[in-house]
Image (cartoon, helix red, strand yellow):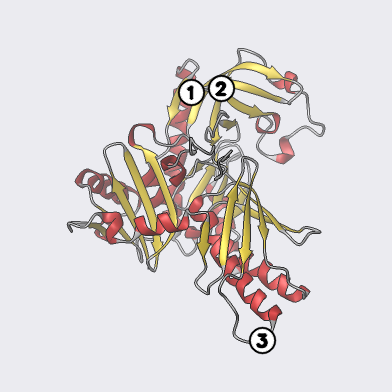
């Protein structure tokens, strides 16, 4: 069973997703400044950069947004020109356009925006100009994928596109149609607001943290939603009544004197799982190091000695356990970009394949897209994971003023 625990403070909303009591996802945002990813803006191009094939767009945030040429071309590949044009041919300084944030401002970088619009619903991701229907690869059996694909083709208008999400599996046609109609109506309102607005202007803000988590991870038939704030309880109940009627009874109010995150061991797990050194249940360890460009994870046997005298077996068992934990921690820490994993060296190819397959299997539970590139010549496993928002826990940490984040200071 999964539990979605929502903690409110004066300035913060924090949400933790637990599975059988184990923390698997965490997010946080400021109440007055909730995330911008997925939001729509009327923007004005302030600079066109031929050398980067991109443009900078003023959308009203502190830093101008970055719009790459591929995000200006038509969303459907068949509608794109055979040879990519110069950015100067399709963008000009002062031009106003409707854009959507795909990547929030991170560090010193502004937001990344696109004209390939998408609106996620509970069951459907609506893409008003994509002109195709796709079905989540996680849906099985094939007969259900065929049903959903056919239904999507019947429901969509010419030029529209959609992705049937994993939770669409088994849902009635009427339920999916209702989701589509709501998203289509929302898109029409965004377009109308864009026509009436002068850039820069925010047109539509995505749901707040609690509502997004309910939309994306909450299963009303099996999961529990625990809140500790009466106002938050009313908000989530109203949202559930609108999107998942009948599931309001799954909202529990925490009345105990013990703080919510302490009662569900969230605080303890956050401190443990965001440390540099993490112990595996079997005795091995993971050491995490983060740079601006990539994340490096080192796997060590630690105190794990194995069940027999075979070094290869001991090493493989440690690596398999590490692969499971790394998949969970990548999701929990919301790591983005390049990830290099230094598993303990294995001699047999079949064991390397087992570790790869275990990691790949566990990554399928992650809502964020990831891709395992493969083993390098030095025996390191290379992968990537998409970054959309700043890690929730990262908002509560700052670089040490004494060591500058290196963990070391000069003693001479």
- Tag 1, which secondary structure? loop
* Residue neighbourhood size for the residue with mark 1, other residues' Cα within 10 Å, grouped as few (<14), some (14–19), many (≥20): some
Residue marked by disc 1: 61
Apparent side of residue 367 relative to residue 2 in the rendered image (left or right): right
Residue tagged 3: 309
* Secondary structure of residue under mark 2: loop
The local crowd at label 3, few if under 14, some if 14 to 19, many if 20 or more residues have their Cα within 10 Å, is few
Which tag, 1 or 3, sits closer to the chain's start? 1
Q: Indicate the position of residue 264 as horizontal and vertical percent values.
A: 31, 61
Q: Is residue 259 left or right of residue 355?
A: left
In the image, what residue occupies the spot 79% across and 30% down? 84
Residue beneath disc 2: 64
CB-based contact (under 8 Å), mark 2 and mark 1: yes
Q: Where on the picture, by quarter, is residue 244?
A: bottom left
Find residue 31 and name its label. Answer: none
Q: How many marks?
A: 3
- Whole-angstrom CA distance, mark 2 to mark 1, is 7 Å
As drawn, 78 above or below 227? above
Instruction: Specify the farthest residue to the top.
Output: 94
Q: Is residue 187 visible?
A: yes
Kindly report the distance in space between the C-alpha atoms of the residues bearing marks 1 and 3.
60 Å
* Residue name at image x 25 percent, y 45 percent: 232
How busy is the neighbourhood of tag 2: few (under 14 within 10 Å), some, or many (20 plus)? many
How far, Cα to Cα, is label 2 from label 3? 60 Å
Q: Which image quadrant: the C terminus?
A: top right
């Amino acid at each position: 069973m999964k539990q979605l625990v929502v903690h409110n403070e004066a300035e913060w909303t924090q949400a933790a997703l637990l599975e059988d009591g184990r923390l698997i996802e965490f997010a946080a945002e400021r109440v007055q400044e909730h995330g911008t990813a997925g939001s729509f803006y009327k923007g004005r191009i302030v600079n066109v950069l031929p050398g980067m094939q991109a443009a900078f767009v003023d959308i009203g945030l502190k830093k101008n947004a970055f719009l790459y040429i591929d995000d200006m071309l038509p969303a459907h590949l068949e509608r794109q020109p055979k040879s990519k044009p110069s950015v100067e041919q399709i963008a000009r300084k002062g031009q106003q356009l409707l854009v959507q944030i795909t990547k929030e401002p991170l560090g010193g970088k502004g937001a990344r925006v696109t004209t390939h619009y998408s609106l996620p619903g509970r069951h459907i991701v609506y893409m008003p100009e994509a002109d195709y229907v796709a079905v989540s690869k996680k849906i099985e059996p094939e007969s259900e994928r065929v049903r959903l694909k056919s239904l999507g083709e019947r429901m969509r208008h010419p030029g529209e596109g959609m992705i049937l999400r994993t939770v669409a599996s088994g849902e009635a046609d009427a339920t999916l149609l209702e989701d589509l109609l709501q998203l289509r109506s929302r898109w029409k309102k965004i377009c109308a607001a864009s026509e009436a607005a002068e850039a820069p202007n925010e047109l539509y803000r995505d749901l707040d943290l609690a509502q997004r988590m309910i939309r994306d991870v909450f299963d009303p038939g099996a999961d529990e939603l625990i809140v500790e704030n009466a106002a938050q309880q009313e908000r989530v109940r109203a949202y559930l009544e609108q999107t998942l009627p009948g599931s309001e009874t799954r909202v529990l109010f925490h009345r105990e004197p013990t703080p919510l995150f302490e009662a569900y061991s969230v605080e303890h797990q956050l401190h443990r799982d965001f440390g540099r050194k993490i112990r595996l249940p079997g005795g091995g360890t993971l050491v995490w190091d983060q740079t601006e460009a990539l994340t490096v994870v080192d796997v060590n046997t630690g105190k794990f000695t194995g069940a027999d005298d075979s070094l290869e077996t001991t090493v493989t068992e440690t690596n398999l356990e590490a692969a499971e934990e790394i998949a969970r921690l990548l999701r929990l820490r919301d790591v983005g970009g390049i990830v290099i994993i230094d598993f303990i060296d294995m001699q047999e190819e079949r064991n390397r394949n087992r570790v790869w397959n275990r990691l790949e299997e566990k990554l399928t539970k992650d809502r964020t897209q990831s891709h395992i590139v493969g083993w390098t010549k030095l025996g390191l496993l290379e992968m990537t994971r998409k970054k959309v928002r700043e890690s929730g826990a990262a908002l509560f940490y700052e670089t040490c003023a004494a060591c500058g984040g290196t963990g070391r200071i000069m003693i001479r």
